Amino acid sequence: MNSKVISFDSIDSTNDFLKRNWRKLNNFTICWALTQTKGKGRNGRSWFSPKGGLWFSILFKPRKIFSDVNLYTKISSIALCKFFEKLSLEPIIKWPNDIYIKRKKIAGILTETIFGESNVAVIVGIGVNINNDIPSELRDKAVSLKQITDREYNLHITLRKIVGYIFRIYNLRSKKTGIATIIKMWKKRLFPKEGEEIKVMLNDEIHKVKVLKIFENYIEVLNDKRILKINSGEIII
Ligand code: BTN
């Protein structure tokens, strides 16, 4: 896929750069920054983006948007897993789309959609802890690739590899069973799975529950004969 990379030493947020400029940029433009001063996470959280991490966003300007915009996020989470799997690591996608290795978060994805008068843009922002150190207060929750493998990585090559996987998986969409294949690849790596028993934190207490069904915005679980809806923050990995 032919994509232009616009890079910065520092920017507020690579997602916001594409949001400001999407009209004049081409499909598949990538914005990459060595640091972000206002990196954004999901649910209005901020995303700490120091030097050494990989912080980038991809602009999609599809003629026809997938009816499920979450598919862009799913494609990116599979691509991140494939990158880590190639390094003989065992990543999982913690529902809905956080990437974990050894029970700690290594990457996150923030997808935003913009509707113009006649067209639409999808911005997929990806943050991966590569060579950056994790601040002590986050060390029990987050990890970097350097910490796991004890070596540093070239960020440019890493970006190219991850983007290569994203476009390869994205290209499956035009095949007849492409979307079903993408969902299958995502489910294979997903935690939790339907039917699985997991631990969740409800009202400050740990409960063992059975996963009944996974929806886009919540998971239905069985807790003591009661059916509950839980969100991602409640799942214990
Ligand atoms: C999350 O897990 O909460 C999502 C984190 C997404 C962070 C990336 S870093 C590059 C892009 N620019 C942003 O401001 N956020 C995303």
Image: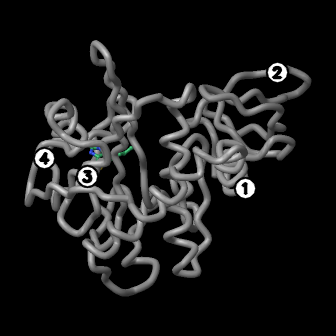
Query: Residue at position x 36%, y 34% from top?
Result: 122
First in sequence, mark 2 or 4: give its number.
Answer: 4
Q: Please identify, in this view, whether the residue under mark 3 or under mark 2 is nearer the observer.
A: 3
- The amino acid type of the residue labelled 4 equals Thr
Contact between marks 2 and 4 (CB within 8 A): the answer is no
State how far apart marks 1 and 3 are (Cα). Answer: 28 Å
- The amino acid type of the residue labelled 3 equals Ile
Q: Secondary structure at mark 1?
A: helix
> Ligand 1 closer than 8 Å to the CB at disc 3?
no
- The amino acid type of the residue labelled 1 equals Lys
First in sequence, mark 3 or 2: give its number.
Answer: 3
Which mark is on residue 30?
3
For residue 167, what is the image quadrant?
bottom left
Query: Residue at position x 58%, y 45% from top?
Result: 173
Report the residue marked by disc 1. 188
Report the residue marked by disc 4. 37
Q: Where residue 17 sits: x, y (%)? A: 16, 39
